[in-house]
Amino acid sequence: MTANMEMGKKIRNIRKTQDLSLSALAKKIGKTSSYLSQVERGLAEPAITALREISKALNVPIFYFLVEDQKHNAVVRKEDRKVLRFPGSNLTFELISPDLEHEIEMIEAKLEPGASTLDKPLAHNGEEVSIVIQGKMEIVIGSEKYELDKGDSIYYNASLPHKITSVGEDELVFISAITPPNF
């Protein structure tokens, strides 16, 4: 079974357990029923923004749809991390925490110079702490803008719209702890 089919099956299963019709979920996410049907059957791959809307509407972390179903260990070897890359994007996420079944999630993100995590700032429930491992980060939180260098960290309330951009000459690498798991 392809990754798109697995993701679609998870979306359909959660939708059905919540007694949501295809059209009701489509309306909640601002998409057509036919589009959502294609996603559920693995015939279309949702954009990250659409997948965020689906996860928000179903009240599950986005990574739930992206990680393989398997028994998770407390130790996560670098080579065993769940990796999320978006087509046509200069952004990569790796899930550092073993799964999304706990109270905290940790991710490592990599952004090429000039790339941003999102087109526009996005808010979600919870809190985040991020530390810059490499490169230079610009983070917009609400109406405030901060620049962080290697070794700098920032804590923020994630209910404020936020967006991260790589503003240095080198790739930006940062680690974020997010609670509750929301990705």
Image (spheres, rainbow, N blue to C red):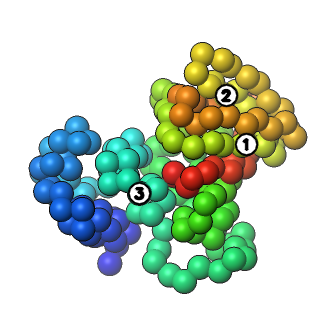
Tell me where residue 81 sits by quadrant.
bottom right
Q: Which mark is residue 183?
A: none
Look at the image and tell me whether residue 61 can be seen.
Answer: yes
Identify the image quadrant of the N terminus: bottom left
Q: Earlier in the sequence, mark 1 or mark 2?
A: 1
Q: Which mark is residue 60?
A: 3
Q: Nearer the viewer, residue 80 or 169?
A: 80
Q: Is residue 153 above or below residue 73?
A: above
Under mark 3, the amino acid is Val
Find the distance from the CA under tag 1 to the CA under tag 2.
10 Å
Mark 2 — residue? 139
Residue farthest right in this picture: 151
Residue name at image x 51 percent, y 52 percent: 183
* Element marked by disc 2: strand
Q: Is residue 16 left or right of residue 160?
A: left
Tell me where residue 145 sits by quadrant.
top right
Q: Is residue 75 left or right of residue 55?
A: right
Q: Is residue 80 above or below residue 126?
A: below
Find the distance from the CA under tag 2 to the CA under tag 3.
25 Å
Q: Is residue 95 left or right of residue 12?
A: right
